[in-house]
Image: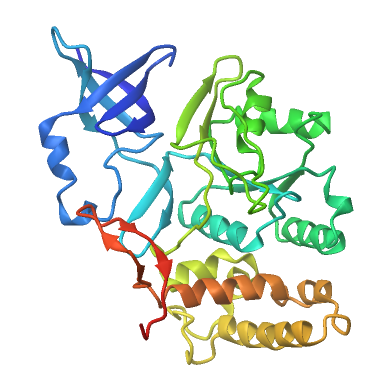
Amino acid sequence: MERSGIISRVYGAYYDILELPDLSRTRRGRLRGRLRLEKGRPENARERHLLIVGDRVNFLEDPGAEDVAIEALLPRRNAIRRGGAYEDHALGANIDQAAAVISLAQPGPRWGFLDRFLASCYAGDAPAWIVFTKADLAPAEPNAAEIFEMIALYRALGYRTFLLDLLLGQPADELAELRRLIARGVTLLAGPSGAGKSSLLNLLLGRTLQRTGEISASTGKGRHTTTNSSLYYESDSSALLIDTPGVKEWGLHHLDRRTILESFPELHAVSGECRYADCDHAPGARDCAVQALLRRSRERALAAYADEDAVDKADDTEAGLIHPDRYRSLAALLESLEYTDRIRTGDYIKPTGRVRTGRLRSPDE
């Protein structure tokens, strides 16, 4: 008899499956031969795995076998991905909402990482939240004023934000609201190592599912405690949470330039003002409102970084421009798309297309 389930973990050739309808039983499965052949198709060449956490599948029990046989992958509604030059890494499928977990101190916030995550959520058609952790430590940071300015900016752009002290589980009303929201469906948690994803997961589900780690004294960055995406089910609230590995880099090579531009709310708001409906917002496009806004934002960003005391960055958002820090993030993001072949000493491309990296070397070496 064919049954269905949700992929909850991927490891090697095996998959953990939460069996539907009640998700109370975990089965270990392997792909049927014909599905394994799908990985070799050209359209799947960039995929790290054919199936990903959150996928819905049909499977059969093989008489006398311990593992079940995965017969079919059901259509995906969406997926959250990060893309490198040679390979895409899908972190979760069929996502109802996604949350970036960003530490405000020890380690400090990485705004560029956050902007890339938000662009991936836009492309994946998944509403994005931002959960700021270690809020109790932020006021003591040397750049505390800038941190809280950026938090206010993301709120003004329409992103739902939460400020939490995970150690004390405060504020209680913020946590209660998060618990209410995750009951709506499948929620993906992503963030840099050390941001507190595992602690947040334990807090939301009310039990210890993931171990937590310390910050490295030598690098000031977090140590990985989650090494694979995993899906957890909370029976009391029917919440499904996907905890993803700590990420150092979030590439967007799987997105085109126009999608990235439109993922920024500041630009999306003016994209309908272009003279031509099919405008691609490329440099040199005629009467392009997006390019006009980018030019003005660039001028303000250059002025802000030339004399930070003379220009109030917060005024740029009120004037409809891109905040200088957001503009710098966008400029770096677009520039990175032009350098897909960054080769480092010791690099080699595996048969799967994945690049193993070594020391960065000059293009002239």
The spot of residue 134 in percent (x, y) is 77, 43
Task: State whether residue 14 is above or below residue 321.
Answer: above
> Is 4 positioned to the left or the right of 261 in the image?
left
The spot of residue 231 in percent (x, y) is 47, 29
Q: Residue at x 30, y 47 (%)?
A: 48
Q: Where is the N terminus found, in terms of image quarters?
A: top left
The spot of residue 177 in percent (x, y) is 74, 32
Quadrant for residue 273, please give it: bottom right
Residue nearest the viewer, comparing 130 with 86: 86
| Residue 287 in view (yes/no) | yes
Residue reaching furthest to the top: 64
Residue nearest the viewer, comparing 105 with 310: 105
Q: Residue at x 78, y 39 (%)?
A: 164
Q: Residue at x 26, y 60 (%)?
A: 349
Task: State whether residue 200 is above or below residue 107.
Answer: above
Task: State whether residue 290 is above or below residue 109.
Answer: below
Residue reaching furthest to the front: 218
Q: Residue at x 64, y 82 (%)?
A: 293
Task: State whether residue 207 is above or below residue 324.
Answer: above
| Residue 271 in view (yes/no) | no
Quadrant for residue 174, please give it: top right
Residue nearest the viewer, comparing 311 with 74: 311
Q: How many marks?
A: 0
Q: Where is the C terminus found, in terms of image quarters?
A: bottom left
The spot of residue 9 in percent (x, y) is 39, 29
Residue nearest the viewer, comparing 34 with 48: 48
